[in-house]
Amino acid sequence: MKRTTLVIALISIIFTAKAQNSAANTSSEIASYNKLRIALYGGQSYQLATANLDIPADLNDYFFEMKSGQNIGGQIDYFFKESLGYGMTFQSFITSNKMEISEQENISDIVNISFIGPSFTARGLAYNKVSSFYTTVSVGYLSYVNSKNREESFEIYGHALGYSLGLGFDIGINNKLAIGLKSNLIIGKVNDFKNDNGLSVNMLYAEDGEYSSLKQVNFSLVLSYSN
């Protein structure tokens, strides 16, 4: 009887020790958080700037169709605290259109608006430390390139200081990978452009007080890796 009691007591001690060790490990895993986050995303974008009043009436629809396009981008963040991090963000908006004016004349435009800059992110983590809700602000370099084809091919391009404000959320697939959605607003304005026809580059100066807005809103599907 004493031997049976001793065996039962020993088994109880072993299982209790294992349970405590498992609980400690689980608590440690939950208490920790991923400091590095790398995200790739892409989706739909819309230009919010008012159309140029100098556009001929018969080209209104042509340029209106170019207000929407696709975006691709990426972001890398290092979180020095569970809820705060800094990093870099990049996003590129692409849209294009073409139209036949006559049997002898076609026009086309391919517009690319890109943003890159340092970013600051605040996030709230769920219990699993992977799913999260976050907001990101960034200030950086905003560029505009329009590859145009009229009677000849040429490029109109310019750059400006840009600002980006984004909101998004991640849903954890496992403790490393997550999918989610994000939206962000990019703001910037260009005062002067350059016209490059391959032979020469000419400046296109805006009138005093005038500028071209590059404001756009983006909606994206996100795949992220955290470690």
Image: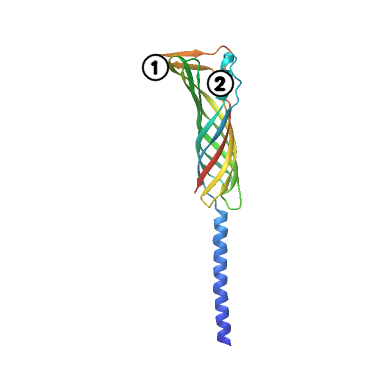
Residue 182: horizontal and vertical position, in percent?
58, 38
Name the residue rendered at 54%, 27% in the picture.
Answer: 162
Residue at position x 51%, y 44% in the image: 224
Residue bearing the label numbered 2? 63
Q: Is residue 104 above or below residue 226?
A: above
Dot 1 falls on a residue whose secondary structure is loop
Which of 135 and 97 lies nearest the eye of the viewer? 97
Name the amino acid type tagged 2. Answer: Phe
Q: Residue at x 57, y 75 (%)?
A: 12
Q: Secondary structure at mark 2?
A: helix
Q: Position of residue 44 (x, y in %)?
A: 56, 33
Mark 1 neighbour density, 10 Å: few (under 14) some (14–19) many (20 or more): few
Give the label, 1 or 2, closer to the camera: 2
- Alpha carbons under labels 1 and 2: distance apart: 24 Å
Q: Residues within 10 Å of mark 2 (few under 14, many from 20)?
A: some
Query: Looking at the rendering, in which quadrant would you find the N terminus?
Result: bottom right
Q: Indicate the quadrant where residue 184 lies.
A: top right
Question: Can you tell which mark lies on residue 198?
Answer: 1
Q: Are marks 1 and 2 in contact (CB under 8 Å)?
A: no
Residue in view at x 55 percent, y 58 percent: 28
Q: As displayed, is residue 106 above or below residue 2?
A: above
